[in-house]
Amino acid sequence: MSWDPGFEAAFHPKAIAIVGASGSAAAAEQRGGHGGTMFVRTLKQLGYPGHIYPINPKGQDVLGCKAYPTISAVPEHVDLVIVSASARHVPAILEDAAKAGARNVHLYCSGFTESGGETGRQLDNKLKEIARREGLRVLGPNCMGLHVPAARMSTWDFMPAESGPVAFISQSGGHASFITRYGREFGIKFSKVVSYGNATVMDCTDFLEYFAHDPETRIIGQYIEGIKDGRKLTQMVREINRTKPVLVWKGGVTEAGARAISTHTGSLAGNKQVWEAFYKQTGAVRVSSADEVADMVITFLHMKPPQGRRVAIIGGGGGNTVSATDNCAREGLEVPVLTLETQKELSKFVPPAGTSVRNPLDMGIVLRDVDLFLRTMELVNADPTIDVVIVDIFLDLVKEAGEEKIDEMGRMMCELARRGKPMAATLYTFGGDPAIRAERAKLNKMLPEAGIPIYRSLPRAARAIAKFMDYHDFQRDLTKWEGIS
Amino acid sequence: MSWDPGFEAAFHPKAIAIVGASGSAAAAEQRGGHGGTMFVRTLKQLGYPGHIYPINPKGQDVLGCKAYPTISAVPEHVDLVIVSASARHVPAILEDAAKAGARNVHLYCSGFTESGGETGRQLDNKLKEIARREGLRVLGPNCMGLHVPAARMSTWDFMPAESGPVAFISQSGGHASFITRYGREFGIKFSKVVSYGNATVMDCTDFLEYFAHDPETRIIGQYIEGIKDGRKLTQMVREINRTKPVLVWKGGVTEAGARAISTHTGSLAGNKQVWEAFYKQTGAVRVSSADEVADMVITFLHMKPPQGRRVAIIGGGGGNTVSATDNCAREGLEVPVLTLETQKELSKFVPPAGTSVRNPLDMGIVLRDVDLFLRTMELVNADPTIDVVIVDIFLDLVKEAGEEKIDEMGRMMCELARRGKPMAATLYTFGGDPAIRAERAKLNKMLPEAGIPIYRSLPRAARAIAKFMDYHDFQRDLTKWEGIS
């Protein structure tokens, strides 16, 4: 892989030129309208610390930013150009950018290949030609561009949270913004998010290359509609995936979906078999919804790699634990019977009626008694047949024993997770008890920090853990194979 | 099916005897302990209007209710006996109930077949013998019993909401209580919920029989671990399902799950093939999680039966609509291209850039303009290639055009749903804007009432609508077949 340091400036620009931002557009902005002015407004709102240069023919200032008629008229080096203009003006704008020595261009505007017409195709060829000739890194067209919390820049009207270790590369601006916002509900923090649209010049492989080198990024998510160089993608993902897990969400996997992407980003979906082969060869983590993206990210962020697929399930309620077992088994996890020693020890303090100590552990009673819970957890954690411990907690039940018990139980789990086997949790409550909600909010922070991801449901937990194991098995096999060959 | 009117009294008891409720147990109650006293307390809290008779050897009053040493000592006819006592005392208690002429007995206590021992098996046989000899309707053992909002009775510490048209029959008390509480978040109201545990005497077929006749019940959900008379269940579900949709969640479908149920309700799970055949022969709606139960219930409650599987998807964002299309296609729904006429009409007011008018309809712009939204909805609704309209709304986008727009859009959808094709919606918002949350709360009420179920995600919507169609196709084929044969 080659590494292009000039691209770094796009993520931390000292100066941004925004083509198509004009004073007259300020009216549209009142009702949240799109366009160049929106970019100016959003950057200012987010406290972007660099210089903003609106570009419009009349040199009309926008929201207090001094405007210029062309990019080349801007009196300083421009690190990033954002273009919000009619597609037909784009070639001239690119020439202007090149003349100004600006190399990073984000084409927000649409109306190219994806519109299906001959004009769009011609414009496409034109912009490819200019980009090649002038060495421009063109992002888009038809995309939302860059979201970089550390640089306080974003296209979507959303204050970037703290910076974090997750990058998301998305051919869809909608998905990029959805994942960023939704991820926040799971405590996921992003290093950079890229919405790259039609991928006419720069494709996802270019961004992958960047993130492979980005020290801030530890996990990479992708939403792909089509790809130009499948072989390159396969090689890159296989390699990067070894050190930075790569999640790949392929859009247009069904016939109807493939048709839909042709009008979205104008991409060719590629056939199903090819993508199956891609996943097999790369070991990329396959995801197919925002839920799965969030679940896999929190798993990679927080959970220690388990030694195997044998899970213990600790919960209250026979039906719940039976269903949890079904969920785990369906996803390819094992729920083995605990050793007789462990069962014997558990039976010393767990009453036989209405409980089970074999695994799954149906023991509402221990959820009501923190000391019993700790003893149970210690025993299960020490059992040699178990690789991962899943705790399914109905918080209302814990609270029956006292509000402070939720916190106590949480601390206990954290302590155990730090020194013991990989753990996961699902927490639920009903009825909106504010005390329980407050305790849960604390757990939502405390548990992940100690290495315990919290999932929204048992089926989601089971699926995520199974995929996490698939990832580690793939890497283990790959290393073994290379040792032999 | 035979119909046993005496069973009705169990659901609307004038007098309940609670065996095992004692004054001394009141201490346990302080920390939310289980046992007979818990039942007394819960019934009183819920405002149960009938008479409560604690039964304990010393005749110790409980929470102001006069106690008696035996059921037969109670000075009025007892409609329901709830037993919270050691398993070994159960035979004597049943004899006492029979002597008192009480026919409905709920055995809350566990320690029977599910405990795996010889004592449990013997007690099981004993209680079967007494029940048969005395004609007792025994619910359980090892179960939570009855939750009847209209009668203000419930085992779980949860104020029954208004009564409604949904019954849930569950071999697991945990699932019964979970579904009741979780369902509430979807506006689901229950007629009766039955937790029946080991099914030693009364099995799910007995409750099915009751709900088939219950005028209050229109939809029946079931969670089954094992079944004694599979043939009877098949015949009953096939018949009842024609007029009252029957959802069946089978626990223990995996090997590990099957092992888990043996220690839960002591049931034999039955093999996978047999259950496959059950679904095929009955047309029962297959569900396998609380999420699916909720989703299917709201679909049956609110949506008109569509003529076919061809859906239109209206949303904002190319990626979102591509993924929505993938989701629908994956579940066996079609997302056909709209007629050229419809596309032509849509193109008159939908700008070509960044949108698609073919289907899926990627048009963030119409979500920002209620008039355009209405025109779009009318056109799509009138298109002959479409059976169901799914609207995927990012409320934050609508709000950009004004807070009142969310309400306007909602009213429009309701009006259209009432006179037009079946509709479904997914609504989302991020960042917790209180104005948007308030509007969404209104929509959550308004839309379902007009026939538009609201799903938590597009994948869930697609799955529910596909299963809904499976149900109607099955019924249509069944009717056709009977017309021929």
Image (cartoon, coloured by chain):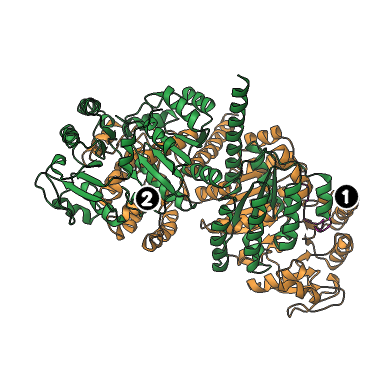
Chain colours: A green, B orange
Q: Secondary structure at mark 2?
A: helix
Image position, residue B339 (x, y; %) = 31, 32
B251 or A13, which lies in front?
A13
- Using the rendered view, name the quadrant where residue B334 is placed: top left
At label 1, which amino acid type do we have?
Gly
Q: What residue would you read off at disc 1?
A: B117
* Same chain for the residues under marks 2 and 1 in the image: no
Which residue does the image show at 19% across and 40% down from the upper left? A85
What residue is drawn where x is 28% and y is 53%? A49
Viewer can see residue B332: no
Residue at the far top: name it: A485
For the C terminus of chain A, the image quarter is top right
Instruction: Find disc 2 in the rendering and name its residue.
Output: A150
Give me the chain letter of mark 1. B
Find out whether residue A353 is within the magenta segment: yes
Q: Residues within 10 Å of mark 1 (few under 14, many from 20)?
A: few
Which range is magenta? A348-358
**Is A15 part of what is drawn in magenta?**
no
How many numbered discs?
Answer: 2
